[in-house]
Amino acid sequence: MKSDIEIAQAATLKPIAKVVAKLHLTSDNLVPYGHHIAKLSANTIQMLQTKSDGKLILVTAISPTPAGEGKTTTTIGLADALNIVLANKNQQAMVCMREPSLGPVFGMKGGATG
């Protein structure tokens, strides 16, 4: 089985402009950090605050399973499931994660590893 770092290095990143296009946003709505990472601009956040159809789910704390399934795995699984359910309604779910744990990249597990 490949290690986490081998999987990450083999991944093909999509340009962030293509990712946000699925959300009906353009590169004008972004503050880019290269071609693959961006933040939403302050103007975009203000514009989106006027919409009443958005929902927010916070995954803030969880006791991980022995296999290491915690907040990151739960968040990604939840977004995938919501996108399947919402596909028939022409809606989408979006995930925003601060930073996945870096411990597994360095071969460590546990609370203080990142």
Image (tube, rainbow, N blue to C red):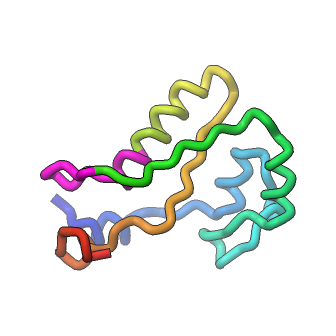
Give residue 107's position: percent from left, percent from top.
18, 75
Magenta region includes residue 33: no
Residue occupying image coordinates x 75% and y 33%: 53
Which quadrant, please, contains the N terminus?
bottom left
Apparent side of residue 13 relative to residue 55 in the rendered image (left or right): left
Apparent side of residue 80 relative to residue 20 in the rendered image (left or right): left
How many marks are shown on the rendered structure?
0
Residue occupying image coordinates x 79% and y 36%: 52
Magenta region includes residue 64: yes
Which quadrant, please, contains the C terminus?
bottom left
Q: Quadrant of residue 106?
A: bottom left
Seen from the viewer's position, the closer of residues 26 and 12 is 26
Apparent side of residue 97 relative to residue 67 in the rendered image (left or right): right
* Boundaries of the magenta span: 63-76
Q: Quadrant of residue 5?
A: bottom left
Seen from the viewer's position, the closer of residues 18 and 80 is 80
Residue occupying image coordinates x 51% and y 29%: 84
Give residue 4's position: percent from left, percent from top.
27, 66
Give residue 23's position: percent from left, percent from top.
72, 46
Seen from the viewer's position, the closer of residues 81 and 46 is 46
Residue occupying image coordinates x 52% and y 32%: 82
